């Protein structure tokens, strides 16, 4: 994907899906004549990284549910996406299980009574960890962009914090808007 401009609409990723629809990434890639996919690498309880813990307003050492996915475009890795959920929301749900969630996490969260009303995204750059290099097919010493997306309900409850890690040699532009919802 090097050199290709990819403009991604954020809104579809934050909207629950109708029954029988693909996930937002598969739909978006398909509209562009490409194949989107993902591999679930991990699901279950973990101690949240500091930035996620702060975003979710969790005390130090508290467990959260993580869903770690490798995002693919035409069978090539383009992003690591780690989504974290408070135990009070996700424990005992399919989010905590290593299997596909029909309709995706946002649809399940809606069904559990949690709908995103506010989204805050922070972007940073860093050198990729060895794990990130391995999953994304990057040489050691490569730079990555990290996007931390926090989604809150209308009453301000943090319901999901996602960390997306993207290679810097693959141009992506994210646009937030109502288009495509």
Image (cartoon, grey):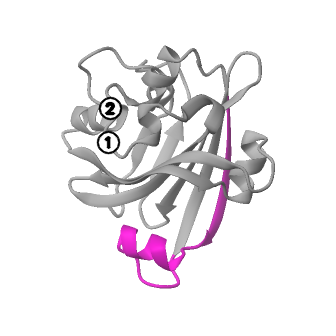
Label 1: element kind: loop
Mark 1, residue position: 99
Q: In the picture provided, is 150 more to the left or to the right than 33?
A: right
Q: Position of residue 76 (x, y in %)?
A: 26, 61
Quarter that holds the N terminus: bottom left
Q: In the picture provided, is 103 more to the left or to the right than 144?
A: left
Mark 2, residue position: 23
Work out whether residue 176 or residue 75 is closer to the camera in this orientation and state it.
Answer: 75
Furthest residue toward front:
92
Q: Residue at x 38, y 69 (%)?
A: 135
Q: Position of residue 45 (x, y in %)?
A: 55, 50
Q: Decide: marks 1, 2 in contact (CB < 8 A)?
A: no
Q: Residue at x 27, y 52 (%)?
A: 73
To which quarter of the image does residue 2 belong? bottom left
Work out whether residue 170 or residue 117 is closer to the camera in this orientation and state it.
Answer: 117
Asked if residue 174 is positioned above or below residue 113 in the image, the reply reads: below
Quarter that holds the C terminus: top left
Q: Position of residue 97 (x, y in %)?
A: 40, 42
Number of residues whose C-alpha sits closer than 10 Å to that of mark 1, classed few (under 14), some (14–19) or many (20 or more): some
Work out whether residue 60 or residue 39 is closer to the camera in this orientation and state it.
Answer: 60
Asked if residue 116 is positioned above or below residue 26 in the image, the reply reads: above
Furthest residue toward bottom:
140
Identify the magenta region: 119-142
């Amino acid at each position: 994907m090097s050199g290709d401009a990819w403009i991604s609409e954020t809104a579809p990723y934050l909207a629950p899906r109708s029954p029988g629809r693909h996930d937002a990434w598969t739909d978006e890639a398909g509209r562009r004549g490409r194949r989107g996919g993902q591999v679930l690498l991990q699901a279950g309880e973990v101690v949240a990284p500091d930035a996620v813990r702060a975003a979710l307003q969790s005390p130090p050492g508290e467990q959260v549910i993580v869903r770690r996915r490798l995002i693919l475009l035409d069978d090539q890795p383009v992003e690591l996406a780690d989504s974290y959920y408070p135990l009070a929301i996700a424990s005992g749900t399919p989010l905590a299980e290593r299997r596909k969630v029909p309709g995706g996490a946002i649809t399940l969260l809606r069904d559990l009574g949690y709908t995103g009303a506010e989204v805050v995204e922070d972007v940073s750059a860093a050198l990729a960890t060895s794990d990130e290099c391995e999953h994304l097919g990057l040489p050691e010493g490569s730079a990555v962009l990290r996007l931390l997306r926090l989604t809150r309900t209308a009453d301000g409850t943090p319901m999901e914090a996602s960390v997306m890690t993207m290679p810097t040699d693959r141009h992506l532009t994210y646009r937030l808007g109502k288009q495509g919802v």
